[in-house]
Amino acid sequence: MPPATPAQHKFQSPKGTRDFYPADMAVRRYIESIWRKVSINHGFEEVDGPTFEHLDLYTHKSGPGIVSEIFQVFSGKDEEQIRSIRAGGDAPFALRPEFTPTLARMVAAKAAELPRPIKWFATPTMFRAERPQRGRLREHFQWNVDFMGGDVRTEADAEIIATAVAALDKLGLQPGDVVVGYSNRLYVQEILIKTYGLPEDNLDAMFVLLDEGTKIGPEQFDQRAIAMGIAPSNVDWFSTFAGVRPLEGIGRWDTDSVWIEPLKRAIQQAGVSEWCDFRPGIVRGLAYYTGTVFEIIAEGERAIAGGGRYDNLIESFGGPSLPACGFGMGDVVLANILHDKGLLPEEVIMQPLRPHVFVISSGKEQAEAELPKLVAQLRRAGYHVRHSYRSTRNVGKLLGEAGKARARLAIILGDELAEGKVAVKNLDTGEQGEPVSRDGLESSIKAMLSAVDV
Amino acid sequence: MPPATPAQHKFQSPKGTRDFYPADMAVRRYIESIWRKVSINHGFEEVDGPTFEHLDLYTHKSGPGIVSEIFQVFSGKDEEQIRSIRAGGDAPFALRPEFTPTLARMVAAKAAELPRPIKWFATPTMFRAERPQRGRLREHFQWNVDFMGGDVRTEADAEIIATAVAALDKLGLQPGDVVVGYSNRLYVQEILIKTYGLPEDNLDAMFVLLDEGTKIGPEQFDQRAIAMGIAPSNVDWFSTFAGVRPLEGIGRWDTDSVWIEPLKRAIQQAGVSEWCDFRPGIVRGLAYYTGTVFEIIAEGERAIAGGGRYDNLIESFGGPSLPACGFGMGDVVLANILHDKGLLPEEVIMQPLRPHVFVISSGKEQAEAELPKLVAQLRRAGYHVRHSYRSTRNVGKLLGEAGKARARLAIILGDELAEGKVAVKNLDTGEQGEPVSRDGLESSIKAMLSAVDV
């Protein structure tokens, strides 16, 4: 009898975070494995940093306002930290809300010894102190890919975009499913000032408005644009430029611009043109972008990914002046889209988790003694091996359990064991050949699974 | 010219956390990949939970004292949370210091629908608000493996131990390098009370003393043992039992005990006897253990792993009464030992990160145009492909760069391109055969890399 339990308390995960049960985890690992493989195939090397950083790493570039958007962290052991917070201060640490400050700090710390270009990727977990919504959680995973240094800016921009596209392609998405909208902040700036006569002082505010763009709707967009200095007679045209109104007029926007044409050509050379579209009004929200900017959009969803060129950021963290370009792609919106399009079929997701072998004992003494030895031997040889923990020795029932576990082969330890043989059944085809020798079983299995990566 | 930079600030990672540069990350991924592969091959399924949990998930079992050992977390957006902390309260969340409470919460939440036994593993990051020391950081990764339910306690204990051993084996360690010391709390309890006459009220305190054991040295151990009720005439014998004095006398301890003998036999059946040793004094520090306990020890280091049976824990988190056994293995001590024993050779660690192909252009116009196309084509085909970003077109220098990148093959786009052919050099052997057809290049490469998993 278990001891009487105390009054029960129902524990739950914090709002906006996730419990990954095996089926959820299989999806997460599937996406992460494609992110990693594509990154490595494109010549990026993996890095990571701490889950929490000093708070001032984030206030440094973003200003003190950011403290109200992040989770703050302090040591429960450190009296001084606790006293300081109770006296009205902030906590000394923050859960990372983005990876770029960590990246800039790491590059700055070892700038002299790192070979150029520095091509890094990471798949860290990130945190936002916000109300959770569809596509936006308090903790999520984000693929970060960055190309720093090397005197090849446009080529680097295109390579970064091609890397993002390669992952979406491998995940089964088609060019029509998503659009990589790209532009350049210097192009937008030129248009704003030269074509629309925007006062230079309003540039930053206008970038914020352009980034909010479609979220706020045409009326409010027009009002705010006019208030910043866009002539009322130009505002229809301007909202098309911004992508707030339909893009039919897009032909009017100048892809021959010195800011756009070379990138367009590099995207073509990288073989991803059909995924990409010039969207003049894209500027991205983060103030540190200095040139090319892009976001990957699926109809009716938040952006899947966003990125761009940030040539001054690493220097501002104490590093060298290093041109840089990168993007972040979160797991939440991406998984929603893959799920909605039926691109997470169970047979694909579970494929790497299928047992190679399910070992069954018919219950005879010799079989019972053999089972743990065989299981241990095959696991040591690198196979994924399972067996039943139930008390039944009904071979039919146990074959059913093997099938439910998605095992490829069943090994049945039965009467033939007296002659040193065992039965092997292919559970995919249902075939069961002549019993094979127990001694040579490991190589028999190897042959039968030859198509399988062990 | 870059803009003049503001006064520079040197940013650093928080004390006791790590920056993973590519070489560090390769080691971490190497260890994690073996943890994952061994877990899956032993039939465990992967899970994960949030990085931060409600603080009361930890105070529930461990009492309020734990708040001073963990990092506390609050939302910078939530006025109420901030007010509560400033008024002297704790933060609402904590960075997870261990995985077992999350595991128990997750099992409790879906107990009815989870098939038994529940065999789960995880490789989460963990946090401790402590002064960093060798083998002990503020953030580290921990492999957790748990076997819950299924009416097979001793077999489950042995399987858990065999899983831990399989990873150490695959990482290159030998039975002599580490010892899996095992015991059973019920056995220890019986000896303490029956053999040594320890008052039952002192049992918990004695478990704490036994766990501190070797850390505090024989004199202090003896004093505290006597104070708790061990007869001074028995204290030498007792300190041998505890493992505080040399273990020569170990033969005197009764492995025929009903608490020890079945586990010993199951360990034998699982094929890992030579890694394991009965160590009667092992009890482990966590109060929730109820039976088998074990730790994996290397001379002169903190424990590599520790675990045991915790049959009442899941019920205490609102779940069903479910027998359970598991262990945790951190990455820090393990990596230190592997490093000291030369078991992290660069060629092993970097093997999965080697480029398949390095593409070189001789500088001719046709070659320059072909390079980005070929790179894109081979990456799309699943190969890890690199090329130079330098302006040199000196093929010798570029072959040097390819070798430094550890590429397997170099493809040289030279004069033969005019006839639709390219040169391919095997960088491992130095061989360069006849030029091959550009059109059939993908299959030529596939054949040349046939030994390689693409």
Image (cartoon, coloured by chain):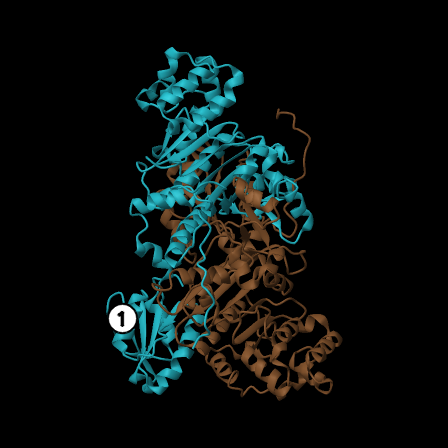
Chain colours: A brown, B cyan
Residue A394 seen from this side: no
Counting labels gives 1
Residue A341 in the image: above or below residue A437 = below
Viewport quadrant of the C terminus of chain B? bottom left
Foreground residue, A22 or B77? B77
Secondary structure at numbered mark 1:
helix
Q: As rendered, which of A209 and B295 lies closer to the eye? A: A209
Q: Nearer the viewer, residue A153 or B405?
A: A153
Q: Residue at x 53, y 54 (%)?
A: A55
Q: Is residue B371 visible?
A: yes
The chain that hosts pointer 1 is: B
Q: Is residue B379 shown above or below A132? A: below
A220 or B368: which is nearer to us?
A220
Quarter holding the N terminus of chain B is bottom left
Q: From the top left corner, tell me how far across and down residue B336 is, in percent.
A: 35, 44
- Spot the residue most to the left: B430
Q: Is residue A331 left or right of residue B421?
A: right
Crowd class of label 1 (few under 14; some 14 to 19; many from 20; radius 10 Å): few
- Tell me what residue is drawn at x 54 percent, y 80 percent: A186
> Percent x, y for residue B366?
36, 86
Residue at numbered disc 1: B400
Q: Mark 1 belongs to which amino acid?
A: Gly
> In the image, A282: left or right of B444?
right
Rendered location of residue A297, percent (x, y): 61, 71
Can you tell which quarter of the image residue B322 is in? top right
Task: Give how far across and how far down residue B38 sits, in percent.
Answer: 43, 46
